[in-house]
Image (cartoon, grey):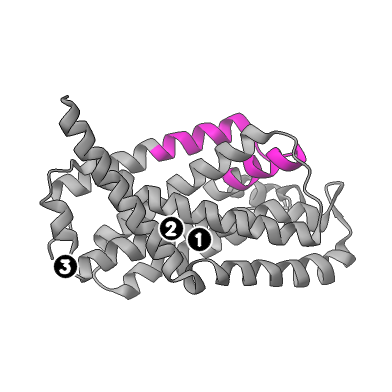
Amino acid sequence: MSEAITRARWIGFKTIILREFGRILRIWGQTIVPSVVTAALYFVIFGSLIGSRIGSMDGTDYMQYIAPGLIMMAVITNSYANVSSSFYGAKFGRYLEEVLVSPLPNWVIVLGYVGGGVLRGLLVGLAVTVVALFFTHLPVQHLMSIFMAVFLTAMIFSLAGLINGVFAKNFDQVNWIPTFILTPLTYFGGVFYSINLLPEWARTLSYANPILHMVNAFRYGFLGRSDVDVLAAFAIMSLSVVVLFFIALQLMSRSAGLRD
């Protein structure tokens, strides 16, 4: 590969990332503030009011227990929303075609949009972490687990958001999956409770929820405890990134839903 081609691809990738970053900051009232406010409400209502009655969860202060889950919930929601809305917006505005006819290979385009989603997910996750520190102390037991879990999760849902953006025919379809699929999976993903509280059949069913593994891998990084096998959780996340990236590339190559 010549240096000129490598440089052109890097410029294209950087341009998409900068465009996405500019969009995040330009409408910060929609991209960052809502998650911060929502997280603060969760801490006040679930952490302070209800948590004071619950006491502890598996030997951990309830406020401290839910903090990693709330951070991860914000990362999931924002990573997905950023790419799905941005990619569909490019389709709707008819300027995605300019990207598609450029000399950039599809994998660079996919990585550019996914990079924007990861960036927003990490920014909002950091903001929610700052909010969490006003309510509770978060010890760090395994720093690498924290970084790996949040990065892989942001990548997974950024890729999923891109796939949704490819198929979406209108803005309602962009919001359909977060409302009817992501939200239930997140609430049943161990954010607010340990699955050890569930009956055997419900606990077994919970293991099929991928968000449970992501939340617990992230929580393990802070608290050193998890309801699932942490190595298996990272294996699931890594495999999901590979599979979703392959699917996204195939859809881009076939121009499925991109020129409708």
Q: Position of residue 164 (x, y in %)?
A: 32, 59
Q: Are marks 2 and 1 in contact (CB under 8 Å)?
A: yes
| Residue at which label 3 appears | 94
Q: Is residue 96 visible?
A: yes
Residue 223, numbered circle: none
| Residue on which the image places disc 2 | 80
Q: Residues within 10 Å of mark 2 (few under 14, many from 20)?
A: many
Query: Which residue is rendered at x = 68% and y = 51% of the image?
Result: 68
In which image quadrant can residue 46 be found?
bottom right
Nearest the camera: 50 or 64? 64
Residue 229 appears in the rendering? no
Is residue 77 found left or right of 55 in the rendered image?
Answer: left
Residue, x 39% and y 61% (percent of image)?
22
Which quarter of the figure is the N terminus placed in?
Answer: top left
- Regarding mark 3 in the picture, which secondary structure is present there? loop
Q: Is residue 163 left or right of residue 59?
A: left
Q: Position of residue 66 (x, y in %)?
A: 73, 56
Marks 1 and 3, how far apart in space? 26 Å
Q: Is residue 99 magenta?
A: no
- The boundaries of the magenta stretch are 214-241
Q: Secondary structure at mark 2?
A: helix
Q: Amino acid at mark 1?
A: Thr
Q: Secondary structure at mark 1?
A: helix
Tell me the quadrant of the picture where the C terminus can be found: bottom left
Q: Residue furthest top?
A: 1
Are circles 1 and 3 on residues that touch, CB within 8 Å?
no
Q: Position of residue 141 (x, y in %)?
A: 75, 35
Name which residue type carries label 2: Tyr
Between disc 1 and disc 3, whose residue precedes?
1
Q: Verify whether residue 220 appears in magenta.
A: yes
Residue labelled with disc 1: 77
